[in-house]
Image (cartoon, rainbow, N blue to C red):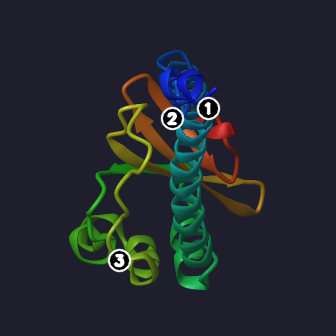
Amino acid sequence: MKRYLRGKKSNKGYSLVELIIVVGIIAIIVAVVGAGLLRYIEKTKIRKDVSNGEAILTALTAAANEPEIYRDMINNASWSTELTPGTDMSASYALHMGMLFTTAGQNIGKLPEFEYKKTQPTEWAMWVVHVDNHLECHVGIKTASGTYEVAPNREGPYAN
């Protein structure tokens, strides 16, 4: 009996087939979780750009409702501009864009950079439209394929 046990190989450790199966299962789990994580990161970047657009919209709307600015702008049917990220609204454009930018720029300061780069964004688009007896403000993002509104409505890739 002792001779039989001495000749038998030890069964400690894992075989190569078992290791390959475990590595394959781990690879499948990483692929599934990684794809979901990438989608989550992409949506987070879109939400950040939309949030920045909403902050710009809030500042524009507050400025447009100031009595002096309202009286100045009510005579125009519409007004729009496009500015690159990093532009200091209150300093750079106050001289030729009037009091709206000066007042809105005091709350915003520099325009934020874009987070969602997949659409190849280039500029923040802002427009104010005179509708009936009030001013409607809108903010969008100009991209390689067009301009998409992000606040108060969401369009295109920013509609998520």
Q: Residue at x 44, y 81 (%)?
A: 103
Tag 2: amino acid: Gly
In front here: 127 or 14? 14
Mark 2 and mark 1 lie on one chain; the one further toward the N terminus is 2
Q: Which mark is residue 152?
A: none
* Relative to 104, residue 154 above or below: above
Mark 2, secondary structure of its residue:
loop
Which residue: 56% across, 30% down?
A: 11
State the SS at label 1: helix
Q: Which residue is mark 1?
A: 29
Picture coordinates of residue 129 (x, y %)? 61, 51
- Left or right, 113 with respect to 138, comes to left
Find disc 3 in the rendering and name its residue.
Answer: 109
Looking at the figure, which quarter contains the N terminus? Answer: top right
Task: Give the position of the C terminus as an image quadrant.
Answer: top right
| Disc 2 to disc 3, C-alpha distance | 64 Å
Q: Nearer the viewer, mark 2 or mark 1?
A: 2
Type of the residue with mark 3: Gly
Q: Secondary structure at mark 3?
A: loop
The residue carrying pointer 3 sits among few (fewer than 14), some (14 to 19) or many (20 or more) residues within 10 Å by Cα, namely: some
- Residue at 51% x, 30% y: name it: 10
In the image, taking residue 91 as reference, residue 144 lies left or right, namely right
Q: Where does residue 104 sit, x and y in percent of width and height?
A: 46, 76
User: On the image, which quarter does residue 30 sit in?
Assistant: top right
Circles 1 and 3, Cβ within 8 Å, touching? The answer is no
**Label 1 crowding class (10 Å Cα cut-off): few <14, some 14-19, many 20+?**
few
Question: Which percent across, then down, holds residue 46?
Answer: 55, 46
| Residue tagged 2 | 13
Left or right? Give the position of 1 relative to 101: right
Q: Nearer the viewer, residue 123 or 65?
A: 123
Q: CA distance from mark 1 to mark 3?
A: 45 Å
